[in-house]
Image (tube, coloured by chain):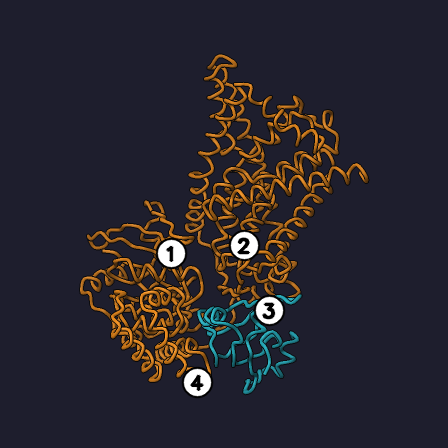
Chain colours: A cyan, B orange
């Protein structure tokens, strides 16, 4: 189990827990982020900036604070066709 | 008849509303709390219909502060039809709100909007199947192009007349049972709320902050039932009850989406390619600097060029008006004040404000502003805020008035207050005129740059102090980044006009009235008294000529006036001959920080009450004295 802020660019992950109060949960829920959902990390801003994720066809920017509260799992990720996800993430 | 437009942000709701309101027709803004509804009257198939645009909300149970007023409207106000605007390209997420709206059991119709966008993304929707799933009529629309809107309103009218309430959605068995159990508890205790008990029960289980407070006040006993039922859901799922209910709605929404949507592969368009550069961790920052730099360069370039001939024209008008009346008389003073007030608005503000608003509308409509919030988020955390606060603060460099109004985009009250306070410290284009006209002209551009940097340092310090002293949690940045899009000229004009109207109705009348009052003060030799009154500050503390006192009073009206009045008060355009560089620096520093202009104070008061506005004004004066004094001392030591 890891938190969303540690997931690399172009990697997919599944939300397994939202580690926060009602307010944060309902915030994420309203943007369509629920437990069990798959999301893709599209970009990670430098200097502990936000993480940009793609979920159900929309893109959502999540501050690092909130990203550390989202526990994700990466089991069952489909390998990218262009090779390993690491290589893809390095921008080749 | 009254129709409500309800939908998620970025669903194209406003463009449907605008097509009905026709931009020009009288739309009424009636603010309730900080979020305002907009309503308009329209003639549909010969019937007069009032259309109300509710604030865009992702969900009715959200802690988003816009959800409260929207929900209150849905619960308490009379209406005949809900038009639920749904973004077809994000059907699953949009349906979550649709299901919540169905719970109200009021006649409803779905506008399946942005069909072109969905098509581009390879999303094909069977709208008939969707209508069957939801049990309400579905009309496909492309509101940006006005497609399908006639059909939408005609079908809506027919559906509203038939007044058939929809059937609420059916969730998981467990959730249904839990809702039913709470609902039974509600009816047996006869809680009168005038809304379907099923809706109230679901909201209680979800811990809805707006409705549950109301119900619990009426019936504190029900809390025990909710707790017991919620506890059972929790132990069965391992998640809290609110997550079980919203998770169940989420699952249902995506199940319906799967049944009615066919996906075909769609390639990356220019939007995706541009985003890869705009949001990239290496190129995003430099591109941002280029875009913003180019933006300000253009605004100031256009402004300067338009301003000069306008000022000439007004000087001529002022001269010919003065000839009409006996010099030094009351009528001459009144006329002069009137002309000055008009001129300040037209010749100084509009040349900068109009290009700025257009540029801003372009940044807004292309969807670049949310990207800016993303890029600057980590920087804003140092001031105790987050990326979204960037949006109003950037506007502050143009004019504080629209900037402070833009703090409405922030979710938490704390963020809104801090951002509004900090925004009033940002040197607007009027203060820029003073910085350039005094410091850059007489001391060099590097000194001007230093003033901007000092300003940012002060803002960072103030932000840090305010954030640590004010209560209230900020959720941090959670922001949808909409697709990039090409701005539409008609919308740009409409947006600019709407923003401009706020300036014309709030700021301008104040400017003219105050200008006349100050003219009268001069006429009655009030200026000398004011200068004497302010001399402890101006002469003793800051070491400035006594004559600057009146210019500072004029500066409260409009910051540019300090420059104009300074030239008049000292009787020369070559200020370097009558003021030392130290005095110029001290004066400019003071002008940049002290009291935002009257229009800004008025907007601050509207946004956060008179007490807040006065507190911020007091703070700016303190900051101005401290900074100007520090500038004076440091310059005499090192300068």
**Residue occupying the far right of the picture:** B638
Chain where mark 3 sits: A
Question: Which chain's residue wears label 1?
Answer: B
> Who comes first in sequence, dot 4 or dot 1?
1
Which quarter of the rendering shows the C terminus of chain B?
top right
Quarter containing the N terminus of chain B: bottom left
Residue B635, horizontal then vertical, whole percent: 77, 38
Which element is circle 4 on? helix
Q: Nearer the viewer, mark 2 or mark 3?
A: 3
B516 or B316, which lies in front? Answer: B516
- In the rendered structure, the answer to whether residue B21 lies left or right of residue A18 reads left
Circles 1 and 3 on the same subunit: no
Marks 2 and 3, Cα distance to the nearest angstrom? 19 Å
Taking B73 as reference, is B516 above or below it?
above
Residue B258 visible in this rendered orientation of the protein: no
Which residue is labeled 2 in the image? B391
Tell me how far mark 1 sits from mark 3, CA to CA.
Answer: 33 Å
Q: What residue does disc 1 label?
A: B15
Q: CA distance from mark 4 to mark 1?
A: 45 Å
* Numbered tag placed on residue B403 in the rendering: none
Q: Is residue B427 left or right of residue B152?
A: right
Residue holding disc 3: A64
* Residue A84 x %, y %: 62, 83
Label 1: which secondary element:
helix
Chain letter of the residue carrying label 2: B
Spatial CA span between label 4 and label 2:
43 Å
Q: CA distance from mark 2 to mark 1?
A: 22 Å
Looking at the rendered structure, whether the residues under marks 4 and 1 are on a common chain is answered as yes
The location of residue B440, given as percent across then percent down, is: 70, 37
Q: Point out the residue furthest to the front here.
A: B221
The residue that label 4 is drawn on is B235
Q: Is residue B408 above or below residue B526?
A: below
């Amino acid at each position: 189990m890891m938190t969303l802020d540690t997931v690399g660019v172009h990697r997919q992950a599944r939300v397994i827990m939202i580690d926060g109060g009602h307010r944060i949960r309902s915030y994420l829920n309203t943007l369509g982020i629920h437990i069990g959902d798959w999301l893709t990390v599209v970009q990670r801003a430098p200097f502990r900036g936000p993480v940009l994720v793609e979920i159900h066809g929309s893109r959502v920017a999540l501050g690092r604070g909130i990203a550390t509260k989202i526990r994700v799992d990466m089991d069952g990720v489909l390998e990218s066709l262009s090779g390993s996800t690491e290589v893809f993430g390095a921008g080749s | 008849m009254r129709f409500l437009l309800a939908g998620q942000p970025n669903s194209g709701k406003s463009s449907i509303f605008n097509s009905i309101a026709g931009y020009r027709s009288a739309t009424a803004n009636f603010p309730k709390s900080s979020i305002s509804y907009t309503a308009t009257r329209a003639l549909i198939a010969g019937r007069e219909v009032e259309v109300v645009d509710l604030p865009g909300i992702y969900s009715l149970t959200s802690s988003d502060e816009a959800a409260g007023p929207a929900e209150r409207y849905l619960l308490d106000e009379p209406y005949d039809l809900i038009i639920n605007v749904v973004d077809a390209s994000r059907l699953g997420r949009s349906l979550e709100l649709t299901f919540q709206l169905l719970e109200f059991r009021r006649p409803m119709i779905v506008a399946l909007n942005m069909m072109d966008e969905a098509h581009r993304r390879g999303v094909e929707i069977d709208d008939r199947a969707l209508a069957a799933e939801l049990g309400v009529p579905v009309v496909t629309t492309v509101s940006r192009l006005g497609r399908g809107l006639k059909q939408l309103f005609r079908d809506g009218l027919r559906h509203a007349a038939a007044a058939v309430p929809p059937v609420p959605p059916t969730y998981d068995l467990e959730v249904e049972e839990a809702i039913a159990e709470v609902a039974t508890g509600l009816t047996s205790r006869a809680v009168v709320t005038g809304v379907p008990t099923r809706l109230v029960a679901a909201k209680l289980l979800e811990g809805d902050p707006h409705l549950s407070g109301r119900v619990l006040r009426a019936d504190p006993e029900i809390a025990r039932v909710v707790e017991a039922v919620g506890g059972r859901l929790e132990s069965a799922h391992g998640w809290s009850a609110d997550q079980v209910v919203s998770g169940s709605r989420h699952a249902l929404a995506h199940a319906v989406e799967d049944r009615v949507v066919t996906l075909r592969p769609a390639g990356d368009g220019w939007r995706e390619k541009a985003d890869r550069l705009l949001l990239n961790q290496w190129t995003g920052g430099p591109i941002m600097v280029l875009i913003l730099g180019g933006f300000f360069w253009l605004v100031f370039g256009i402004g300067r060029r338009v301003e000069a001939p306008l000022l000439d024209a007004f000087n001529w008008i002022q001269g010919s008006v003065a000839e009409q009346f006996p010099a030094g008389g009351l009528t001459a003073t009144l006329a002069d004040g009137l002309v000055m007030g008009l001129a300040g608005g037209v010749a100084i503000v509009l040349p900068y404000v109009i290009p700025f608003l257009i540029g801003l509308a372009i940044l807004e409509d292309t969807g670049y502003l949310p990207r800016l919030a993303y890029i600057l988020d980590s920087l804003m955390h140092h001031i105790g805020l987050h990326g979204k606060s960037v949006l109003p603060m950037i506007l502050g460099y143009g004019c504080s008035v629209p900037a402070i109004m833009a703090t409405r985009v922030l979710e938490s009250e704390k963020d809104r207050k801090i951002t509004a306070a900090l925004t009033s410290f940002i040197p607007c284009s009027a203060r820029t005129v003073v910085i350039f006209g005094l410091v850059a002209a007489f001391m060099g551009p590097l000194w001007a740059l230093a003033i901007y940097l000092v300003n940012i340092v002060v803002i960072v310090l103030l932000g840090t102090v305010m954030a640590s002293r004010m209560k209230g949690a900020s959720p941090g940045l959670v922001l949808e980044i909409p697709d990039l899009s090409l701005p539409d000229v008609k919308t740009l004009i409409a947006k600019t006009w709407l923003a401009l109207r706020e300036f014309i109705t709030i700021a301008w009348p104040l400017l003219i009235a105050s200008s006349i009052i100050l003219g009268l003060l001069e006429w009655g030799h009030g200026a000398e008294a004011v200068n004497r009154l302010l001399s402890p500050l101006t002469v003793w503390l800051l070491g400035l000529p006594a004559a600057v006192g009146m210019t500072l009073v004029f500066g409260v009206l409009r910051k540019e006036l300090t420059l104009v009045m300074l030239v008049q008060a000292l009787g020369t355009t070559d200020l370097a001959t009558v003021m030392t560089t130290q005095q110029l620096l001290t004066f400019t520093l003071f002008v940049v920080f002290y009291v935002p202009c009257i229009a800004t104070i008025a907007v601050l008061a509207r946004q956060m009450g008179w007490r807040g506005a006065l507190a911020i004004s007091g703070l700016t004066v303190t900051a101005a004295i401290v900074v100007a004094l520090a500038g004076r001392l440091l310059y005499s030591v090192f300068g």
